[in-house]
Amino acid sequence: MEYNFKGIKGEDIELLCINRFNDSREFYEEHKEQLKQGITVPMRQIMLDLSDLMYDIDEQMFTDPVRSVSRIYRDTRGNRSKTKYRENMWMFFRRYKKEYPQAPFYFFEFFPDRYGFGLVFWTWRVTHFHIVHEMILEQPRRFLKAVKACEDAGLEFDCRDVYKKDRYPDAPKELKKYLQSKNMSFCYYSSDMLKISTPALIDDLRYAFDKARPMYEFFIEAYQRMMDEGLITPEMEM
């Protein structure tokens, strides 16, 4: 398949790092076009090349290539770090955040020394995530099949925080680590930066995201329950 994405090259990542090191408006303006063509445009092309798959996974998926990609120039207002420029970039594949705040999402990101992608679900209030736990207990076989699908895609389970006390002492052992989690992610990371320098990256993303579809469907169903119960409301209605 012919892709728009041709790769993110090492020299452009190096320039991104140098730009952050200089932290200078003058330096950025001087190299703005090169950074755009070498970093921003390829990131947007990733969205273009995955938009058909994303829409097939979820018809509500927001696939605007411009608004889905982080900016090189950082908004430092209210941020402890006053560095104006990034050396890492990311993009989200998710529903429109104003209408569907806190929705589960796929992502791709890279740093100077590594890149990663995967599927994430976290909520602003930890108590809302109990809906996910309830669904796991209601449909353990479905959930474990979804976990296996993620593992087959090369994605490993992780979470930002866990409960110290066992909240579900009678739950099956194989479910324990998931029921103790306050959020969930299934991710892959690699330090082989040559992998993102060719269109083969798109094949990897398409394969992993499609294979992880059962978990996304599980997450989005839990998310819909949260909305139906009024735990999460659209920002545009607030």
Image (cartoon, rainbow, N blue to C red):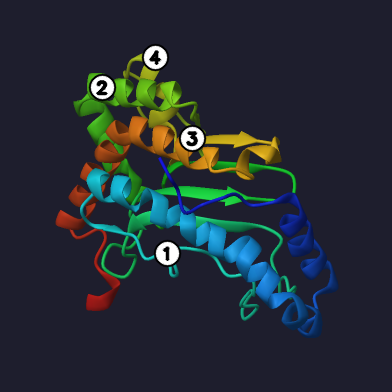
Mark pair 3, 4: CA separation: 32 Å
Image coords of residue 70 (percent x, y): 54, 65
Residue ID for mark 3: 204
Seen at 34% across and 35% down, the residue is 210
What residue is shown at x 47% (from left), y 31% (from top)?
165
* Residue position for label 4: 173
The residue pinned by badge 1 equals 65
Q: Tags 4 and 1 in contact by the CB under 8 Å rule?
A: no
- Disc 2 marks which residue? 140
Q: CA distance from mark 3 to mark 2?
A: 28 Å
Q: Residues within 10 Å of mark 3 (few under 14, many from 20)?
A: some
- The image position of residue 102, as x and y in percent, is 36, 58
- Residue type for callout 2: Pro
Image-based side of 33 in relation to 48, left or right: right
Residue appearing at x 62%, y 61% in the figure: 39
Residue 234 in percent (x, y) is at: 25, 68
Q: Nearer the viewer, residue 84 or 4?
A: 4
**N-term mark: 4 or 1:** 1
Quadrant in the picture for residue 65: bottom left
Q: In what element is the residue under mark 3? A: helix
Give the alpha-carbon distance from disc 4 to disc 2, as whole Å.
Answer: 11 Å
Q: Position of residue 51 (x, y in %)?
A: 34, 53
Task: Please tell me how crowded label 4 is: few (under 14), some (14-19), or many (20+) other residues with Cα within 10 Å.
Answer: few
